[in-house]
Amino acid sequence: MSCRRGSQCRGHSAFFRLRIKESMIITEFMKNILLAFFCVISFSLFAQSQYSRVKVDLTERSIKELAELGIETDHGSYAKNRHFITDMSDKQISFLQSEGFVIEFLIDDVKAFYKNQNIAGHEHYHEHEVEVRNAGPCDTGNGGSGIYDYATPTNYTDGSMGGYFTYAEMLSILDEMQAKYPNLISAKDTVVDIHTHGGNPIYWVKVSNTPNIDNDNPEVLYTALHHAREANSLSQMIFYLWYILENYDSDAEIKYLVDNTEMYFMPCVNPDGYLWNQSTDPDGGGLWRKNRYVDENGDVKGVDLNRNYGFEWGVDDQGSSPNANNDTYRGPSAFSEPETKAVRDFANQHQFQIALNYHTFGNLLIHPWGFSDSATEEDVTFKALGNIMIEENNFTLGTGT
């Protein structure tokens, strides 16, 4: 498995033994009101300008203060009462400094870092040097000596966008999977009657031993790319899909999961944002985060899709923002965006037992609630599942707040 330092390590997963190379958020699923996700998290950036990786000193300040200022604290590396590490725009950095926060620069130009990380001889950023939470080595090759002892699928190769996949490459890979494994994966399809502001559909595929027939097995939903700049969330999903398909006949655990679960995958929830990053930075490193729309003044804006779902939408301004210029802008109303409507409508057509939402940066497995530290009725279940899922990667398990 190829490894990218600086919070960029290819991942894969399996239900109940999920192998995610960066991090995840678990949230509860409530039909018509809430779509809850196990969410994978790997790198966090802010608006489209100059970006740096920084360490925010929290020895005399709190993570709550950052959240109240509109900083997305569920993406990044947090050491309680010590620091918070994330990637920020120059405007965000100046704002925090004006609020009295002490900031140390770890990578001056993080966009250049992401673009150059595949170049031979490039000086990589080492997570252990800044005490990233639970950092560990990744595999360096098939069956490598790292903590993730899984061979890279034969069909998995790097994409052309700085090692990540372009949107067209993603669609082509889904077609290739179906052509090679027609008895295990469906042809790609779209959520009916919904297109993004840019006119793009939301694609999905199904993995099962009956991919074209609805049966009575439990249903699971996987999503990626709610945030356009988290390209590794798509890489993780493609890796996982190839791993399932290639090992179905030889791995009893995978065969059991596929034969007894209907797995649905939405590899790109935010195609408009992803395509924009591809157009501005074809070699990788695009940092646009939200979806994209044109407001009444003709200005391009966006909504943080992960904060646009209905359950407890806008409950406060900590963790999401009412300001359209903020990267955590939650939108004018719950489900205001076509992308979140597509996920909601697709969920309402199924009986998902759980959903897993891939993000990037932080080595986290966050379970509900995301808006409160209060326990859900399923807290024991979430913790039991979570402890299984982190037993080998040593991610931090807990709520989002």
Image (spheres, helix red, strand yellow):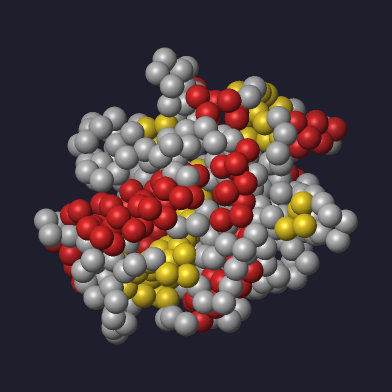
Instruction: Name the outermost residue toward the top.
Output: 121
Q: Position of residue 89 (x, y in %)?
A: 71, 35
Q: Position of residue 275 (x, y in %)?
A: 58, 49
Given residues 209 and 21, the one toward you in this image is 209
Q: Where the C terminus falls, by quadrant?
A: bottom right
Q: In the figure, 300 relative to 105: above or below?
A: below
Q: Position of residue 329 (x, y in %)?
A: 74, 56
Residue displayed at 47% across by 82% down: 349
Q: Position of residue 167 (x, y in %)?
A: 49, 50
Residue displayed at 70% across by 39% down: 48
Residue 310: name its quadrant: bottom right
Q: In the figure, 319 relative to 232: above or below?
A: below
Q: Do we see residue 189 in this rendering?
A: yes
Is residue 44 found left or right of 125 in the rendered image? right
Count of numbered tags: 0
Instruction: Name the outermost residue toward the left.
Output: 250
Given residues 392 and 91, the one toward you in this image is 91
Q: Do we see residue 27 in this rendering?
A: no
Instruction: Name the outermost residue toward the bottom.
Output: 216
Q: Where the N terminus falls, by quadrant?
A: top left
Residue displayed at 64% across by 22% down: 108
Given residues 24 and 269, the one toward you in this image is 269
Residue displayed at 58% across by 73% down: 194
